Image: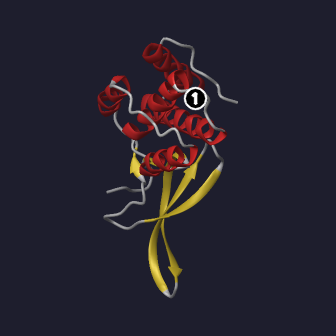
Amino acid sequence: MLKGGDSVFYPYHGTGTIESKEYITVKEQEKEFFKVFFPNRKMHIFVPNQDKNWNGLRPIVSLDQFETVKKGFYDECVPLPSSVSERSKFLEKKMKSGTTSDLFHILRDLLNFHITAGKLSPLDKKTYHDAEAFLTEEIELMKNISFSEASSEMKSEIGNRFNIAAPTFK
């Protein structure tokens, strides 16, 4: 059960800290929300607490869990659809899940597509950048290191996996 002070991950927003539980009336019904602060985005978001459906809100993973999930980054790549719209839908589903495993798979499969199949679309590049940033934020919190140190670790991991310098995709 999540509570105030917990470090969490929320899809499309990254890592944050639950500041409090608050009750807000929505359509004449009082509902419980978590007030989450995202320091890298300098914003607060109210996330509904729906006991069984966290809308992707989850605690950050432990170092052991992270190392286990990271092994999937080294698994065989999944071929991505060549159609930009189909690829976008496929990647959107993984981003929406917000699992550490899916974020690693996004990086792995987009890099493989970039290396083997050609040019990434602007949306592919944004998705890649977001997935990399979210994983970096999780490393930062999990290991209690600076974002810069976490970013170096992430780029090193990418370099080890693909024997290339991590692309910036601007």
Expressed as whole percent of the image width and height from the top left, the position of residue 6 reads 42, 49
Expressed as whole percent of the image width and height from the top left, the position of residue 121 reads 63, 37
Give the residue at mark 1. Answer: 147
For image coordinates 45% across by 31% down, the residue present is 109
Comparing 151 with 98, the one in front is 98
For image coordinates 48% across by 44% down, the residue present is 91
Residue extending furthest toward the bottom: 28
Comparing 52 with 82, the one in front is 82
Protein image colouring: secondary structure
Expressed as whole percent of the image width and height from the top left, the position of residue 118 reads 58, 26
On screen, residue 46 versus residue 7, left or right, reads right
Residue extending furthest toward the top: 163
Residue 64 location, quadrant: top left
For badge 1, the amino acid type reads Phe
Q: Quadrant of the N terminus?
A: bottom left
Residue extending furthest toward the right: 170
Dot 1: what SS? helix
Q: Residues within 10 Å of mark 1 (few under 14, many from 20)?
A: some
On screen, residue 119 versus residue 115, left or right, reads right
Comparing 148 with 72, the one in front is 72
Comparing 70 with 112, the one in front is 112
For image coordinates 48% across by 60% down, the residue present is 20
